[in-house]
Image (cartoon, grey):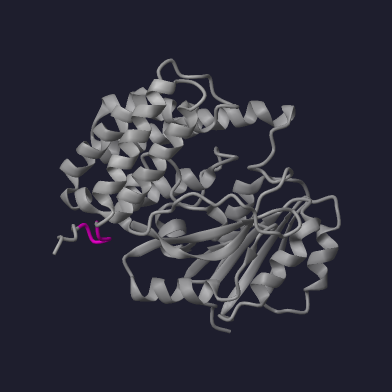
Amino acid sequence: MSSPRVSVVMSVYNGAAFLGEAIESVLAQTFSDFELLAVNDGSTDDTGDILGRYAADSRLRVLTNPQNAGLTRSLNQALAVATGELVARQDADDRSLPHRFRRQVEFMDANPAIALLGSDVRLIDHKGRPRLRRAGYRARTPLGARWQLLFENPFIHTAVMFRRGVVVDRLGGYDETHPLSQDFELWSRLMAGFDACNLGEVLLDHRTHRQSISGRRDAGIIASRRANMERNIAIQRRNVAAILADDAFADEWPPLWTAINVPWLAAAPRNPARALSLIDGMFRRFVERNPHAEYDADIAAHRSQALWTLARYLATRDARGCAEVVFSYWKHRRRTRRYRPNGAAVTRP
């Protein structure tokens, strides 16, 4: 039999509560040329029984770990046996919209230079109801994604599709020294030599709940999350140094921006308002190295989000600094509202 176009990679550990919904959302795709590789990572709940209910569908292949190996190692196990030219990720508590794979495959086929493609998501709660809070902005262009890489992971892991030849054959898959945020480390390596972007449309329901990896803040996981935060800062330092070729920004920016975004985990910075001048300085440096970035609507949209994030952080900590950021935010919005995605300004008639 010929290999499928797409290999869907899913790892599950004690995920019985939402696993059925996740599997059905994959099997119901309008694009049907795929295999689903589900790794039962040492589950002790009903995960195995739920996977067994779908055994009659030949597209499902189950890999079983006798003991919990962790997400990173499980994903690499699945990638090692994947046969599809393209690989789609999905978590075991999320739901892909029926047209997700079709839209991503169409885009990858039309844009062979894109090695990694993400999408927007809709946030849902444990009952599958849409949350009022929206997911953050995700860059639509390769240039915008490189700019966003200075701040955070430009991609939502569970919503990506990538070329197996790049991620597995060229990059060697996920780095197993990263038990969390393994995707941020991998995408950072990928974007050093390949293009990546997001589709500007919602293709997945991303479930956030207390038992999800990103949602847990219990005492038992705090220490590992702090260790992972330090790894992320190290990755971000490398990204800033490579993209801006400036060690001063690389040393100062990552720990400051991390403290602003995860105040419950990181120590409070001495001067958080300093972030405003750093954002402006990094943008000037980015434009020096990428002239088309100056009028790019994608980058302008992300800068607006970054400024608003900073303003919200300062609101209860530094009233004067917050006012300066809010003024900068509105001035930036007025100046950039006529920018085009290809980096050109719309001239007034």
Identified at 46% across, 43% down, the residue is 185
Residue 90: in sight, yes or no? no
Q: Nearer the viewer, residue 113 or 80?
A: 113
User: How far from the left and from the top, in percent, is residue 281?
Assistant: 24, 32
Residue 65 drawn in magenta: no
Q: Nearer the viewer, residue 3 or 23?
A: 23
Compared to residue 325, the image places residue 73 above or below, namely below
Q: Quadrant of residue 121?
A: bottom right
- In the image, which residues are magenta? 339-343
Farthest residue to the top: give it. Answer: 270
User: How far from the left and from the top, in percent, is residue 102?
Assistant: 51, 77
Compared to residue 341, the image places residue 43 above or below, namely above
Identified at 55% across, 76% down, the residue is 99
Compared to residue 25, the image places residue 67 above or below, namely above
Q: Is residue 8 left or right of residue 115?
A: right
Identified at 34% across, 28% down, the residue is 324
User: How far from the left and from the top, in percent, is residue 103?
Assistant: 47, 74
Farthest residue to the bottom: give it. Answer: 1
Q: Quadrant of residue 345?
A: bottom left
For the N terminus, which image quadrant?
bottom right
Q: Predominant secondary structure in magenta?
A: loop
Q: Nearer the viewer, residue 86 or 202?
A: 202
User: How far from the left and from the top, in percent, is residue 131?
Assistant: 64, 53
Farthest residue to the front: give it. Answer: 349
Q: Is residue 188 left or right of residue 94?
A: left
For the C terminus, which image quadrant?
bottom left
Q: Is residue 55 left or right of residue 107?
A: right
